[in-house]
């Protein structure tokens, strides 16, 4: 039992180490975006729409990025958690968004690429609907249940 | 944890990995380009330069502080796997999965790989899940009547993987802990709710699209056959 734990922990640690360089690169990129005022600008532009639908404007970039890149969204999540606090409304919404769905386009690329299929029929609409649902649920859960 | 394969090693084929790296390349370069543009427009060049070194510093600290939680959950899940939990979960999931993927019989190699992949995803064993998923796709492709396109069961399987429900979202929890959350796992129930509804929505759409295609084919058919819904 302990042997399994150790071997699993070793795997987890090794995986984290192997992804660390890319994560560092992406966090730097996201921090640069933050420092340049990009997210503040986007939030300002989108806040009328967001106020209408009750979604905090700051998590919208994360919602768009999540189906596209995993490490990028974790880097963005990190920035949001550090800036707005991990237990704030924004922090919690972002955490639920990041944790409730996978990187859609990556999974599609891997699984169809493995068998050499280029046509995806209705995979992408169905998968993106799932992603959109999880974003909506994330916003609603945190808003109504705190 | 799919997170790992997203940016690092991958047990993927060349084409899948190339596609991923290509996309990430554009994204990363795009992000840096946009930040330069934006800081030129808003006049925050100084903040941008500070952000580069701040980002590097933050990133390394983050990885270090995530290591503890990641090791904990990877270890726990591996121990659970080796103690037979995966077999139990697989058995429980098998009827549901067979209903969702009617093109493949219960005892086929394809369905076995599908069950194993879904179980591994739920337990957060991404390193096991991806190779199993690829094996499942290869097995399914062997009996796929649409040679250059996925059949409805394959699409259902891929959607299940993109909307994966995880028992413990270890990466998010580790991030929250590293960023000083008082309750890193407080969002657990919301995450379950969100991912379950997302999975349901995705699968519902797959079923709707599948049925529409089937009905279309039946209408065009010149032989009168009784219409039996497949799900």
Image (cartoon, grey):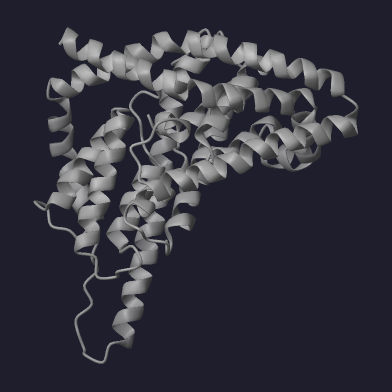
Give the residue at x 35% y 58%. A116
Q: Is residue A58 visible?
A: yes
Q: Is residue B87 above or below residue B158?
A: above
Which quarter shows the C terminus of chain B?
Answer: bottom left
Q: Is residue B138 above or below residue B53?
A: below
Residue A110 at x, y percent in the picture: 39, 47
Q: Quadrant of residue A100?
A: top left
Q: Quadrant of residue B224?
A: bottom left
Give the residue at x 17% y 29%. B86
| Circle count | 0
Using the image as rendered, state which of residue B113 and residue B31 is in the foreground.
B31
Residue A68 at x, y percent in the picture: 54, 42
Query: Quick one: which residue is furthest to the bottom in this view?
Result: B222
Give the residue at x 32% y 85%. B219
Q: Quadrant of residue A57?
A: top right
Residue B199 at x, y percent in the picture: 39, 44
Q: Is residue A82 above or below residue A32?
A: above
Q: Is residue A105 visible?
A: no
User: For this view, does A17 lie left or right of residue A89?
Assistant: left
Query: Quick one: which residue is furthest to the front in this view?
Result: B14
Q: Is residue A34 above or below residue A10?
A: below
Using the image as rendered, state which of residue B151 and residue B41 is in the foreground.
B41
User: For this view, does A37 lie left or right of residue A133?
Assistant: right
Using the image as rendered, state which of residue A61 and residue B51 is in the foreground.
B51
Residue A113 at x, y percent in the picture: 38, 53
Which quarter shows the N terminus of chain B?
Answer: top left
Give the residue at x 33% y 16%. B73
């Amino acid at each position: 039992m302990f042997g399994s734990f150790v071997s699993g922990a070793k795997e987890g640690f090794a995986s984290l180490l192997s992804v660390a360089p890319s994560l560092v690169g992406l966090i730097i990129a996201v921090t640069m975006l933050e420092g340049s005022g990009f997210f503040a600008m986007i939030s300002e532009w989108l806040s009328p729409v967001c106020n209408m639908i009750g979604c905090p404007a700051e998590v919208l970039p994360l919602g768009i990025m999540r189906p596209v890149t995993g490490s990028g969204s974790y880097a963005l999540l990190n920035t949001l958690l550090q800036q707005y606090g991990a237990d704030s409304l924004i922090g919690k919404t972002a955490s639920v968004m990041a944790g409730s769905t996978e990187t859609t386009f990556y999974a599609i690329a891997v699984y169809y690429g493995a068998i050499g299929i280029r046509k995806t029929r209705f995979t992408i609409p169905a998968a993106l609907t799932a992603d959109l649902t999880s974003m909506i649920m994330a916003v609603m859960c945190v808003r109504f249940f705190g | 944890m799919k997170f790992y394969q997203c940016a690092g090693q991958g047990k993927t084929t060349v084409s899948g990995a190339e596609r991923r790296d290509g996309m990430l390349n554009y994204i990363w370069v795009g992000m840096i380009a946009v930040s330069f543009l934006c800081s030129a427009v808003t006049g925050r060049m100084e903040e941008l330069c500070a952000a580069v070194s701040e980002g590097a510093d933050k990133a390394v600290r983050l990885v270090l502080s995530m290591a503890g939680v990641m090791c904990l959950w990877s270890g726990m899940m591996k121990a659970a796997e080796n103690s037979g939990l995966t077999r139990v979960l697989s058995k429980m999931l098998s009827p549901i999965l067979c209903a969702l993927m009617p093109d493949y019989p219960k005892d086929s190699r394809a369905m076995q790989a599908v069950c194993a992949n879904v179980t591994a995803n739920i337990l957060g064993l991404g390193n096991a899940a991806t190779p199993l998923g690829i094996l499942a796709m290869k097995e399914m492709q062997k009996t796929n009547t649409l040679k250059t396109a996925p059949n409805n069961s394959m699409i259902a399987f891929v959607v299940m993987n993109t909307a994966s429900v995880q028992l413990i979202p270890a990466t998010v929890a580790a991030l929250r802990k590293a960023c000083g959350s008082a309750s890193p796992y407080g969002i657990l129930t919301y995450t379950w709710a969100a991912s379950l509804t997302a999975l349901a929505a995705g699968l519902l759409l797959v079923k709707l699209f599948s049925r529409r295609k089937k009905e279309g084919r039946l209408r065009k058919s010149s032989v009168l056959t009784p219409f039996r819904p497949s799900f």
